[in-house]
């Protein structure tokens, strides 16, 4: 294979509702060899994340929308296979934003050299030690401000962000309640991650009643990943001066029309609840603190890491779509 031949996944049509294969196309391209100050990188792993759905809209949601008929982008970990820059050598492992392609040429300052503690676990830098893990860390500590003994409720609790939130909260002595969509995920959270109570929202009936039962002393911090019924139940169960960390609302990402909102928002006023939305990329001042603490927890196995790894760029779209049916367990990764 010519080392400058690459495969890319392009967005060719903006989805209405849930995307499908017709919105994407695999394209073969020939790269231009790197010039001075550039590198050629072969990606080993790429991330698929729910936020990417927002970037498929023409107006975007909280980030610049993807362009049509061009490669999409997102987190990836790759290896430098040709370098025209003195700061990067062949064999260096780099974190980059060039997912959805198996190799690419870029300015050396557009990638970040990694010093992995385990070369066999590079995918960690797309999950627990990457954007999802940092999202959990920043959201919980900067905005949730949990205190030992408080109750933390996490929706989408077995996902890439949620599972980390649950375990970080346990590390600091909180009581943790998670919501998931299967009994298998519930058992994993309880048995492997030490979560105190787990609700299967698909089988529990009235979610407010289930949450109130699981949290008889109320909820102090709600880490919001879903929206809709989950937000309504959380507001009902929140204690006075509770904090809601608004990370995402995956339950609405594929809605073609506006979805009904909670009908109990006045509780925010009466209970004096604080809600903070945030985008993790605005908080790079916490990156070194996050990496130091999270790496230590991973090395000492205080954090359990679970990944769903799909093989091949040809299956990347299927991996992305599976996020919206709850088929992933932990972080969804594509191995290239």
Image (cartoon, rainbow, N blue to C red):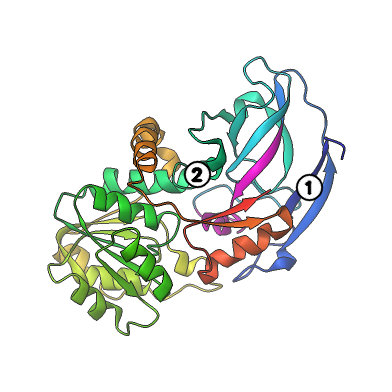
Residue at label 2? 124
User: Distance between the Cα atoms at labels 1 and 2?
Assistant: 24 Å
Give the image location of residue 104, x and y in percent.
73, 37
Instruction: Name the one closer to the observer, 145 or 169.
Output: 169
Give the image location of residue 143, x and y in percent.
27, 47
Residue 246 placement, left or right of 15: left
Q: Residue at x 37, y 49 (%)?
A: 136
Instruction: Name the one closer to the observer, 17 or 113.
Output: 113
Residue 10 placement, left or right of 16: right
Residue numbers of the magenta segment:
41-61
Q: Is residue 314 above or below residue 139?
A: below
Q: Nearer the viewer, mark 1 or mark 2?
A: 2
**Mark 1 or mark 2, which has the lower sequence index?**
1
Q: Is residue 76 above or below residue 275?
A: above
For residue 36, which numbered disc appears in the image?
none
Task: Report the residue that reaches farthest toward the bottom.
Answer: 205
For residue 7, which numbered disc appears in the image?
1
Instruction: Name the one closer to the observer, 105 or 126.
Output: 126
Could you say which quadrant of the image residue 221 lies in? Answer: bottom left
Whether residue 254 is visible to the viewer of this picture, yes or no, is no
Give the image location of residue 76, x and y in percent.
60, 42
């Amino acid at each position: 294979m010519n080392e400058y031949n690459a495969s890319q996944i392009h967005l060719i049509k903006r989805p209405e509702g849930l995307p499908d294969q017709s919105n994407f196309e695999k394209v073969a391209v020939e790269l231009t060899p790197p010039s001075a100050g550039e590198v050629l990188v072969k990606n080993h792993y790429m991330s698929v994340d729910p936020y990417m759905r927002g970037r498929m809209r023409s107006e975007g949601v909280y980030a610049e929308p993807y362009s049509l008929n061009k490669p999409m982008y997102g987190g990836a970990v790759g290896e430098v296979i040709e370098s025209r820059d003195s700061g990067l050598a062949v064999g260096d492992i780099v974190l980059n934003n060039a997912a959805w392609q198996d190799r690419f040429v870029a300015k050396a300052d557009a990638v970040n050299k990694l010093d992995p503690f385990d070369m066999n676990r590079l995918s960690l830098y797309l999950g627990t030690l990457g954007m999802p893990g940092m999202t959990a860390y920043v959201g919980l500590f900067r905005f949730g401000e949990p205190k030992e003994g408080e109750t933390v409720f996490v929706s989408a609790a077995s996902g890439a962000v949620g599972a980390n939130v649950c375990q970080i909260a346990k590390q600091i002595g909180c009581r943790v309640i998670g919501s998931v969509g299967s009994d298998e995920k519930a058992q994993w959270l309880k048995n492997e991650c030490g979560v105190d109570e787990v609700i299967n929202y698909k089988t529990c009936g009235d979610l407010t009643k289930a949450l109130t039962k699981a949290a008889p002393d109320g909820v102090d911090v709600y880490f919001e990943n879903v929206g809709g019924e989950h937000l309504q139940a959380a507001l009902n169960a929140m204690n006075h001066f509770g904090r809601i960390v608004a990370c995402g609302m995956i339950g609405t990402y594929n809605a073609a029309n506006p979805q009904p909102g909670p009908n109990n928002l006045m509780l925010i006023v009466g209970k004096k609840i604080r809600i903070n939305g945030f985008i993790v990329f605005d908080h790079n001042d916490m990156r070194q603190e996050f990496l130091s603490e999270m790496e230590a927890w991973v090395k000492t196995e205080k954090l359990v890491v679970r990944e769903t790894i799909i093989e091949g760029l040809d299956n990347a779209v299927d991996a992305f779509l599976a996020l919206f049916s709850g088929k992933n367990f932990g972080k969804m990764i594509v191995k290239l």
